[in-house]
Image (spheres, helix red, strand yellow):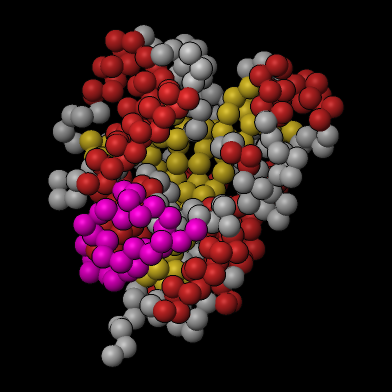
Amino acid sequence: MTAAPVDVLVADANGRAALSVVRSLSRRGISFVALGSELNGMVAVSRHVRRYLRGPQPEDDAEAFGEAVLEAAARHRVRLVLPLSDPALAICSEQRDLLPPGATLAAAGEEAVRNVLDKRRNLDTAKRLGIPCPRDFTLDYPDQTSELIATLGLPLVLKNAGYGAHAGAGNGLKWAIARSEAELRAMLARCSDDAAPPVFQQLVHGDVTNLCCFAARGTIVAVHEYRSLRRIGWEGTSVLREVTEPTPSLVRHAERMLAELEWDGVAQVAFVVGRGGDAWYMETNGRIWASVAGSVAIGWDFPYWAYRYFVHRELPQPPPLAVGAMSCWRFGDLRLLGKRLSGVEPPMPPRPGKLRAIVDYASAFRPGVHSDVFALGDPLPELVEHWSGLRLALGRRLRQPA
C-alpha cells in the first residue's frame, strides 16, 4: 500500500527555528517529515516529531544535502520543501527545478534568494534604493588593513559575507567587533584564503530592530516589529526581545527592498536604530528566523502562513498586534549571563555589574515572557539544549591548558 503524501519537508531541521516550525505544523494538523543532522537534538526529541530523517549538514556537504532533500521529497511525495538555514536555502533554491512533480519550494525567486544570501550584493541593493547603511569597506588584499581602519575607524564590525557565488561560510564568523588593529589582524589571520573576506562595516550604536514580514509578489501583506533588549554580542543573536509598534520609516525601507526583489514568503529585515532616531539597514533574512516562536505566540504564525501561501496561495490574516509581548531564548540568556559575570559581555563598555547581570537574567522568568524552547507539553527540547550546552562547555574547559 502506497503511503499518503506528506505536506511539508522541513529541511535542516536543527535548532530553534525548526522546533518552532514543527510545533506550529503539528498543532495545525499538517503532516511533515523533518530532515536534520541531530538525532538526539532538540527537534528530534520533540513530541511533535514523528518522522526525523538523519542527513548531512548543508554547510559541510552541499551536494549530499541536496541529494538528501530530493530523495526525501520524492519518497514522501511532499507538497512543500521548507529550508530553515541560509546554506539550506541556498542549496534548495539552486535545485528547485529538480524537485519531484507536485513539490514546491517555500522561497522567493532564485535571483531574490541569491541577493539576500550574498551580503555584499544585498547591501549594494539597499544603497541603490536609498536605504541608509553603515559605511563599509571591501578588502581586496591583506595590505589594505591600514586603509580599512582609516576609512571606518576603530572599533569596526566584521560580518559573514554570506552564501553568494563566491562567498564561503564566513570562516566560522557570524558577527564580530575588532577594537584594535592587533585584534583586527588576528581575526583576519584566522580567515581561510578559500572563502570570501568578511564584510567590514562602521560600528553603529543603537537598538537592533527587526521587521518580521510576509510578502506576496513584492508586496508586504503582514509586518510586525520587535526590538532586541539583550543580545549575545559575539554572535549578534537576540536572547530577549519585545514586540513594538512598526516604525513607519523602517516599514518603508522594508517595502522598498522587498518590492525590488519581488519577494515571496517570509523575510526578516534588520536595522539598528540610534538614540536620535537615525536608522541603518543591516540585512534581510530570507527564511524563518530563530526567534519566530515569539511571533507564533502572539498569533503571527509565519510557518503556517508559509504553508498556506505556497501550497494553497492563501494570504496571511494576522491578528491585532500584541505590543509589549516579550519572548526569551533562555539557554542563550544563560550563556550571556556567564559572559557578563566573567566581564566579557557586552563587547563594548559600559558593562553591567555582576548583580545587575543576575537581576537582568532573573527578570526574564516573570509571567508573560514567552520561552523560545520550553513548553509544558513538550519539555524535552529545553532539557536537551541545556544538557548539550553544558557538555560542550565542560569539554572546552577540560581542553584548556592549566
Across and down, in percent, residue 307 comes to 37, 68
Q: Between residues 106 and 59, which one lies in front from this camera angle?
A: 59
**Magenta extent:** 27-56
Which residue corresponds to the image point at 56% horizontal and 37% vertical from the top-left?
Answer: 174
- Relative to 223, does residue 82 appear above or below in the rendering? below
Which residue corresponds to the image point at 31% horizontal and 40% vertical from the top-left?
Answer: 385
Q: Residue furthest bottom?
A: 1
Which residue corresponds to the image point at 50% horizontal and 81% vertical from the top-left?
Answer: 100
Q: Residue 26 magenta-drawn?
A: no
Across and down, in percent, residue 259 comes to 57, 59
Left or right of 401? Residue 173 is: right
Left or right of 208? Residue 27 is: left
Left or right of 320? Residue 135 is: right
Decide whether the magenta segment is chiefly helix, strand or loop: loop
Q: Residue 46 magenta-drawn?
A: yes
Which residue corresponds to the image point at 45% horizontal and 83% vertical from the top-left?
Answer: 102
